[in-house]
Structure formats: structure tokens, C-alpha cells
Amino acid sequence: MQDLPTAADLLDDIGALLADQVIGALDGTLQYHVRVAANLIGMLAREARLADPALPAERDRLVALVGEIEPGAPLAEQVRAGNAELARRLRADEPIDEAAVWAALSEAVAVKLAISRPGYERYDMAAEVGRDTP
């Protein structure tokens, strides 16, 4: 086990340094590039915290949909293989529990959004355009 601080903690500190001290001292293109770097560092920190704990749950949801996946393979490879098999079955229009697929994909996307775009899971397009239906 790695001692503290964790990789995610270190990434948070680097991102905060860039956002709080460096970006304001820059302008133009360099400021933009450092802002992008700070955002990417934040994404990496969230991935370090959220992705590994989410993999077993995603694998379990995929196993429930498509059966055993690459037994003995690393967890990330099992998830990739399970997603590939699910995509193949959906493209082939094979019979599958659509409600279970929707639930599994919604959970996977929620984790991906929490990593890449926190808060986006609460986005309401209808509220943005000022109507109840798209």
C-alpha cells in the first residue's frame, strides 16, 4: 500500500497550485494551456479516486448481462471485454433485457461523468431551453 499522500492527493495539490497561483500570473495562450493542464490534472485525480472502486461493480453488471467475461484477466480487461461483448450483442440485435442494459449503461456513464465532468449528472436540458420537453 502506498503511503500518504496518495497519487490523487498529489494531483489535487498540483491542480490547486496551477489554478490558485500560476494561472493568474499568465495571460493569453499560455494561460489557456495551463488552465487546460489544471483541468486535466483534476480529471486524473478524480479518476484515481473513482475508477478503481467502480470497476468491480461495472464488471458485475456486465457479467449479469453477458455471462462470464475473460476469467482470470485483469479487472480492467474484463470490463473492456464485457463492454465489447455487450456492444456486439446489441449490434446483432440479440435478445437481451433492455431495462438491465439501460441500468448498467446509466451507472457506467454516471461514473464516467463524475470523473470527466462532475455535476453534469444533474444537467437538465429542458430547464436550459426553458421548456418541459425537448
Image (cartoon, rainbow, N blue to C red):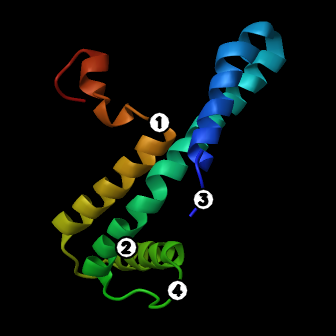
Q: Does dot 1 land on a helix, a strand or a loop?
A: loop
Q: Is residue 57 above or below residue 41?
A: below
| Residue position for label 2 | 59
Which amino acid, mark 3? Gln
Disc 1 versus disc 4: distance between alpha carbons?
Answer: 30 Å
Q: Does dot 3 land on a helix, a strand or a loop?
A: loop
Could you tell which of marks 2 and 3 lies nearer the N-terminus? 3
Q: Is residue 41 above or below residue 63?
A: above
Could you tell which of marks 1 and 4 lies nearer the N-terminus? 4
- How busy is the neighbourhood of tag 2: few (under 14 within 10 Å), some, or many (20 plus)? many
Q: Is residue 134 left or right of residue 39?
A: left
Q: Which mark is residue 117?
A: 1
Find the residue positioned furthest to the front.
3
Residue at x 44% of width, y 51% of height:
50
Q: Position of residue 95 (x, y in %)?
A: 22, 81
Query: In which quadrant of the rendered image does the N terminus lie?
Result: bottom right
Could you tell which of marks 2 and 1 lies nearer the N-terminus? 2
Q: Which quarter of the figure has residue 67?
A: bottom left
Q: Position of residue 63 (x, y in %)?
A: 31, 80
Q: Position of residue 87 (x, y in %)?
A: 41, 72
Residue at x 20% of width, y 67% of height:
100
Disc 2 versus disc 3: distance between alpha carbons?
Answer: 25 Å
Circle 2/circle 3 CB separation < 8 Å: no
Which amino acid, mark 2? Arg
Residue at x 38% of width, y 33% of height:
120
Disc 4 versus disc 3: distance between alpha carbons?
Answer: 24 Å
